[in-house]
Image (cartoon, rainbow, N blue to C red):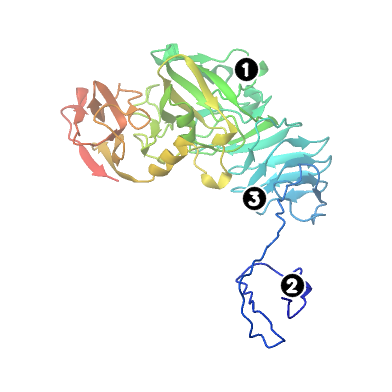
């Protein structure tokens, strides 16, 4: 048997698609013989692509164009000229040369697998609602960057829960016109405001501690009309895993990164110690040094609940620079990691104040309704009723949220003697009780949202 044509013409042809190979026994070129057997052996070579190590390929921005194309996740991005982002940018590492000014604008993220290096007079600025998100926690950053974070509008004497995304930011320089005795740490041993909040000693020589939250009052000369505070941090961007000590009770933490973090992932990573998250909003001002209603917004895996004074409902993202409270069941540590970090486009919300991945997907199947308690003078609080697969009749850790401050009139649920302010699941059980206190003579109004 011999081929009718030269098979070499098939060399180099695309192997995709359907190929037909016709065989016949040729007898004196009449092709009428009998074919008793036939076999064919197909040989191929598998080519496995091995990506280049970080540093093999580089591309340089000269102020107008990239020398080797827009960087990819295995390409080093070098900035030798000024750059202002128009979209997300990804690279395996970033080098900013002296004299180059690099800015990432709102909703844009600089995604870096390894380290960021800022040389000499070079600058990297992460604008409000932008982000620097690093993948590998072992990357060691070099050089200072600037991170900008705006507060929600504040009035004089308002407090905001802050934290720092950089190493080396002095706490007094962050808000220089705040009185020295109005920077506070929170002590888990405290049971009242005077015993829980401790003024930071020597603020002029104290830097923010990564992952720790601070309550900072607005500048002493701040306007009495709502005004945004333009916070600005300067220092080496924090990267990698972090453990923050927790005491039994309430603790004030903060997002340690120059990017938002996912609240669900943070809660899963700390599920043995941490339940609900609480965000100080200060939506209603104090009167005579006392807040008339509850100013904490809350969040669990079921969703978010606004503070009594209204404002945004927590959406599952903890913003850059955001301080927040957790209630720890015991002594231990809260864990932060790069796996919790997300892009800037996830959320712009900021407050003044494995199996898990499968479970997160299942959490998308939620059925919820929010109920507000008001009278003719005040809005007292909001609760959320929800249905969620996997909930039980008892207190469900990570789903139900305990009351943080029960000294004010409020609507809550009572489960196993636990007052649940923000969240409770309904599985044949729904007990709503009104804490009327001294306001029992008033008329209350309910509305759903």
> Observer-nearest residue: 230 or 54?
54
Question: Where does the image place residue 76, in percent across and percent down from the top left?
Answer: 77, 44
Front tag of 2 and 1:
2
Q: In this view, does 85 lie above or below 141?
A: below
Secondary structure state at the residue bearing disc 2? helix
Say the numbered circle drawn on residue 88: 3
In the rendered image of this protein, does residue 265 appear above or below residue 72? above
Q: In the figure, is residue 228 to the left or right of 189?
A: right
Residue at the left extreme? Answer: 441
Where is residue 108 shown, x and y percent of the image?
Answer: 62, 48
Q: Quadrant of residue 144?
A: top right
- The reply to whether dot 1 and dot 3 touch (C-beta < 8 Å) is no
Mark closest to the chain's N terminus, 3 or 2: 2
Residue under pointer 1: 203
| Disc on the earlier residue, 1 or 3 | 3
One can see residue 163 in this view: yes
Check residue 351 in the rendering and tell me which mark sits there, or answer none: none
Quadrant where the N terminus is found in the figure = bottom right
Q: Residue at image x 65%, y 29%? A: 238
Task: Name the image quarter holding residue 112.
Answer: top right
Q: Distance between the residues labelled 2 and 1?
A: 78 Å
Which mark is on residue 10? 2
Viewer-side residue, 246 vs 439: 246
> Could you say which quadrant of the image residue 54 lies in?
top right
Q: Which of the pair 41/196 is nearer the observer?
A: 41
- Asked if the residue at tag 2 contacts the one at tag 3, i.e. Cβ–Cβ closer than 8 Å, the answer is no
Looking at the rendered image, the disc whose residue lies closer to the viewer, 1 or 3, is 3
Q: Residues within 10 Å of mark 1 (few under 14, many from 20)?
A: some
Q: Which percent across, then down, holds residue 78?
A: 80, 45
Q: How far apart are marks 3 and 2 (CA)?
A: 44 Å
């Amino acid at each position: 048997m011999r081929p009718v044509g030269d098979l070499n013409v098939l060399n180099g042809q695309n192997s995709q698609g359907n190929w037909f190979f016709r065989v016949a026994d040729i007898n004196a070129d009449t092709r009428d013989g009998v074919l008793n057997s036939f076999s064919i052996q197909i040989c191929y070579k598998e080519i496995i692509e091995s990506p280049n190590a970080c540093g093999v390929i580089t591309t340089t921005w000269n102020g107008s164009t990239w020398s080797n194309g827009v960087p990819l996740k295995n390409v080093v991005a070098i900035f030798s000229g000024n750059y202002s982002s128009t979209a997300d940018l990804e690279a395996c590492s970033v080098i900013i040369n002296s004299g180059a000014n690099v800015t990432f604008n709102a909703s844009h993220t600089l995604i870096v697998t390894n380290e960021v290096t800022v040389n000499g007079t070079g600058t990297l600025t992460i604008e409000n609602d932008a982000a620097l998100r690093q993948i590998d926690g072992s990357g060691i950053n070099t050089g200072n960057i600037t991170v900008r974070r705006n507060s929600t509008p504040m009035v004089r004497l308002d407090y905001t829960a802050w934290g720092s995304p950089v190493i080396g930011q002095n706490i007094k320089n962050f808000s220089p016109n705040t009185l020295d005795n109005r920077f506070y740490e929170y002590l888990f041993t405290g049971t009242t405001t005077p015993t829980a909040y401790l003024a930071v000693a020597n603020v002029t020589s104290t830097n923010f501690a990564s992952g720790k939250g601070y309550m900072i009052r607005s500048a002493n000369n701040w306007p009495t009309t709502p005004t945004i505070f333009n916070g600005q941090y300067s220092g080496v961007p924090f990267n990698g895993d972090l453990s923050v000590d927790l005491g039994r009770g309430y603790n004030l933490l903060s997002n340690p990164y120059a990017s938002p973090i996912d609240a669900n992932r943070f809660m899963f990573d700390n599920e043995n110690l941490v339940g609900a998250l609480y965000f100080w909003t200060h939506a209603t001002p104090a009167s005579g040094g006392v807040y008339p209603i509850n100013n904490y917004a809350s969040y669990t895996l079921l969703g978010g609940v606004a503070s009594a004074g209204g404002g945004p409902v927590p959406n599952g993202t903890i913003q850059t620079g955001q301080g927040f409270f957790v209630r720890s069941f015991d002594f231990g540590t809260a864990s932060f990691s790069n796996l919790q970090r997300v892009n800037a486009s996830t959320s712009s919300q900021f407050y003044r104040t494995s199996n898990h991945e499968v479970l997160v997907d299942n959490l998308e199947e939620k059925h919820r309704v929010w109920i507000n308690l008001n009278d003719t003078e005040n809005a007292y609080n909001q609760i959320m009723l929800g249905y969620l697969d996997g909930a039980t009749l008892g207190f469900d850790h990570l789903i139900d949220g305990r009351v943080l401050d029960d000294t004010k009139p409020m609507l809550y649920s009572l489960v196993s003697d636990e007052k649940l302010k923000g969240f409770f699941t309904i599985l044949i059980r729904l007990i709503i009780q009104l804490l009327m206190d001294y306001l029992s003579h008033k008329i209350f109004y309910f509305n759903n949202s």
